[in-house]
Image: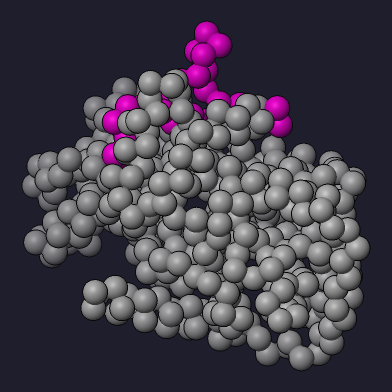
Amino acid sequence: MMHTDILIVGCGVSGLYCALNLPKEKKIVVLTSREAQKSDSFLAQGGICVLPDEEDYPSFYEDTMRAGHYENNPDSVEIMIRSSREVIRSLEDFGVCFEKENGRFLYTREGAHSRPRILFHADETGKEITSHLLEAAKSRQNITLIENFTMVDLVCRGNSCSGIIGRDAGGSYQSILADYTVLATGGIGGLFRHSTNYRHLTGDALALALKYRIQLQNIDYIQIHPTTLYTNKEGRRFLISESVRGEGAVLLDAAGKRFVDELQPRDVVAKAIFEQMKKEGSEHVWLCLAPIAQEKIKSHFPHIYQHCLQEGYDITRQNIPVVPAQHYFMGGIAVDRCSKSSMERLYAVGETACNGVHGKNRLASNSLLESLVFAGRAARQIAAQYEKAENYSAPKVDAEHYAHCREEYGQLVLNAIEREKGSHEQH
Ligand code: SIN
């Protein structure tokens, strides 16, 4: 058994940023079920939204709400946009570089954005941000990173969380008790056959929330990204960033004709692609990058260029077959403006959490921003709780009982999503 002050489960941007914003005198353990680099945050291509100037506030707000079908929580949207510049400044302090020209930020565009407001680092913005945060976390004396440790249960006393039970790389079970626990376990893509997510992201935190009746929200709001590279191989789908369309690429049917406005919200474009595929009886449509200059393709999208080349497509000359795939989870553990769940001493951040910011459909490149903003708020609230009341003592736990837990979690989550879908359809 181990004891720490704050336990963070997951080491994508939200988990790491939360750890880095907690008081340096507190003992923090950050866990991940795989190696630290295997988080979806590393995979984010397009970029991170920021409020470029005050005049853009109403449009940024409206774009986020419109993409989310106005089911967004207005307070959360306001907090996210208003905090965006501060978050970007703090990322730069951690050494993160965004593309600039003459010292000024360059902005790219994606679907449903009425103007360019997305900061980027080539087509590997997530890797740039997450690797710097990981490096910073590793260098902090008060943060211990434990890899290959899988959460299998929560430790609860009534409606209060005191840590987790997990399984280490050698298959042994042990408890980690904590004053505060933060769930940052990412999305649910591993439950879907075709997803851009890592396969090990199977919504374990949601299963535990169901088990302990921790409040969930919008769990049937699942985003399908319009463009992933078509392949008949198994495994994670390779994303073709929406910023490729933002920079001018167009979608074509089998006859080489455009069939949709490529810069509508993701759910609209994905639906149009599915309809087109159905009409043609095809397994994909085509993405044509000809409107983008060859040099720009290679400089802005080097990772996509190289990956497609390996798969046999030169995107500077050839159209590529693309198909929609599961990408993001707008629902999750219901949390308040400071990321606190309905259980005491339990927080949830990033894709695991739902503060309502994305509504029914997330606006492109709002995910890294939302994760960072609300992870920072969780950290600040936990720090404030410590100031209010010290000397919390967590209960003791017998880890032997937990050996059976994780196996059925995926099905538990899928059943809950189906139930939620059914109840939305009835209303
Ligand atoms: C993309 O680059 O298309 C994905 C970015 C995001 O999910 O917002």
Q: Position of residue 325 (x, y in %)?
A: 35, 59
Q: Quadrant of residue 31?
A: bottom right
Does residue 213 appear anywhere in the picture?
yes
Viewer-proximal residue among 194 and 67: 67
Q: Which residues are magenta?
A: 93-121
Viewer-proximal residue among 392 and 15: 392
- Magenta part, dominant SS: loop
Q: Quadrant of residue 195?
A: bottom left
Q: Position of residue 337 (x, y in %)?
A: 56, 51
Residue 248, placed above or below residue 181: above
Q: Quadrant of the C terminus?
A: bottom left
Residue name at image x 14 percent, y 64 percent:
278
Residue name at image x 59 percent, y 47 percent:
374
Residue name at image x 62 percent, y 60 percent:
340
Q: Position of residue 271 (x, y in %)?
A: 21, 57
Q: Relative to 23, is 105 on the left or the right?
A: left
